[in-house]
Amino acid sequence: MGSFGEGLTSPEVEIAEGGVIVDSKTRFADLKAMLDSSKDNLKMDAMKRIINLVAKGRDVSELFPAVVKNVAAKNLELKKLVFVYLVRYAEEQQDLALLSISTFQRALKDPNQLIRASALRVLSSIRVPMIAPVMLLAIRESVRDMSAYVRKVAAHAIPKLYSLEENLQPELIECIDYLLGDKRTLVLGSAVYAFEETCPDRFDLLHRHYRTLCKAIVDVDEWGQVVMIGLLTRYARSQFVTPTEAVDPDLTLLLSSCRPLLQSRNYAVVMAVAQLFYHCAPSSQLPIISRALVRLLRGPREVQSVVLVNIATICATNPVLGRPDFAISNNMFESFLKSFFIRPAEPKHIKLLKLQVLTSLVSETNVQLVLRELQTYVGIAEIADAAVEAIGQCAIRVSSVADSCLSGLVSLIASSNENIVSASVVVLKRLLHTNPPLQLLTRVLRLINSVKTPQARACVIWLVATHVDKVPTLAPDVLRKMVKSFTHEDEMVKLQIVNLAAKLWFTNHQKCELLVRHVMQLARFDQNYDVRDRCRFLRNLLFSNNKLSTFASEIFITEKPSPTTQSTFKG
């Protein structure tokens, strides 16, 4: 009974029609017998079953010898199915496929265009360098075939032959040049694909075809449009000058030809057009891509992720530095601000990307709306720390709300969530280190005992050290507390304690000399070599009379630069 149960779950066993259990060997034997039959109806039935197995992902490669014998069948439908199978397994069964090359060559002359195209597909799937000349001859003939479908298949065969034999590039470029002049849009997309795979830098081949490609782009199949827009974007960036309001007529032709594709149902096409406008369009034409990109946010999560990364990159473009004519203003997405509000069901990476975009779009006019939204996100555990960071970004970008943001961040330090506390202290460190309100600074410093995470404790001590002259009575008390727990602190906290001690040596030498020496003695024999190394450097600087010691005060007591906003998506 046990073995019967195991057999039912085995991939080698299937339940045939009528509930009869058969293994794959029995089925393959039956299929071989049907393929060897002289009756076309049995052969058709066998091929349909084989193609069905291929579609299900089953390995039917052992049937290759029986199938390949039928490649010369007179039945047209049977021959189509045989070629479908051969295209799938020709690369795996190269030796057996080579035996039928003469049959494939004869099929290239078949009156039926589907047979000619299938024969060329099979021929280009045989990865044997020895037959490269045969493949080249077949491609040369097929690019001039009367059927557009055959010419399309020939274009797809070119990269296969190039990857097999790169020395044939000059001959293949001639074929590509001929295909680029084809009048059928069915062929052009594949021709551009062959160009990109074989000779992507040969822009000289495109000069006489450029306008034809621009006019034909709306009629090319969707995936051909993606490749073609990518190629024309590279061509425009290399051949046209930086656009101003007086745009080159040829560049205008490209932009106007691609603009309707912003309404395409294919996400990749819309993204390709957006990339074209981002790199090549003058600033006055850039806002038209915003609505198209926001529309894509209604798509699948994978699409949302890619689109949000691109929108974040666009929003991070600095309109002052670099190329003013290319500058993309944040307000091109500002009217769609609510489209970037977070929904509870969204995955974490989507939420984080939306936070990045929201902070990039914040301005004097919408800052209150954004802050109210960010306050609700603090309650979402998985993005709480990122929401706190976003509040800090708003305070830096819009100075009028800095005080209210600081008060809110200080109140978050009392939270029971360690991640929120840590993020709040880190953000406060960035905001308070230039001209901090004394009352807020004092509140933060008094919370040193309630802060538990090493990063947050290190930030609080850093704040004390940075503003040691503004809290002359509080700074020594903080150092005394930290000395008691020095041996149990994390490495980053110890390093900040040592730095605080060094600054107190210069600002409050008389009262803190013994305390500072005690800290240095503890650090001198600490288990962490980074702490010992830092201590050794400071002891030589503070306690010796060498030339460098005369500049020690200037090294430690110096003004810090103002905080800046940085984006991970900025190029």
Image: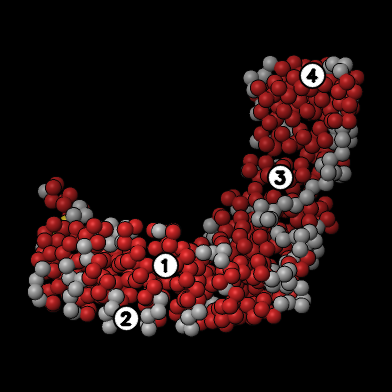
Q: Which residue is mark 3?
A: 424
Q: Mark 4 vs mark 3: which is more N-terminal?
A: 3
Dot 2 alpha-carbon crowd within 10 angstroms: few under 14, some 14 to 19, many 20 or more: some
Q: Nearer the viewer, mark 4 or mark 1?
A: 1
Q: Which one is closest to the eye, mark 3 or mark 1?
A: 1
Dot 4: within a 10 Å radius of its alpha carbon, few (fewer than 14), some, or many (20 or more) residues? some
Marking on residue 113: 2
Relative vertical location of residue 481 with respect to residue 110 in this rendering, above or below: above
Q: Position of residue 61 (x, y in %)?
A: 22, 59
- The residue beneath circle 4 is 539
What is the CA distance from the residue labelled 4 to the residue labelled 1? 71 Å
Name the side, left or right, on which 78 lies relative to 283.
left
Where is residue 303? Give x, y as percent.
53, 65
User: Label 4, label 2: how many angstroms apart (C-alpha)?
Assistant: 86 Å
Q: Is residue 275 left or right of residue 153?
A: right
Q: Residues within 10 Å of mark 1 (few under 14, many from 20)?
A: many
Label 2 residue SS: helix
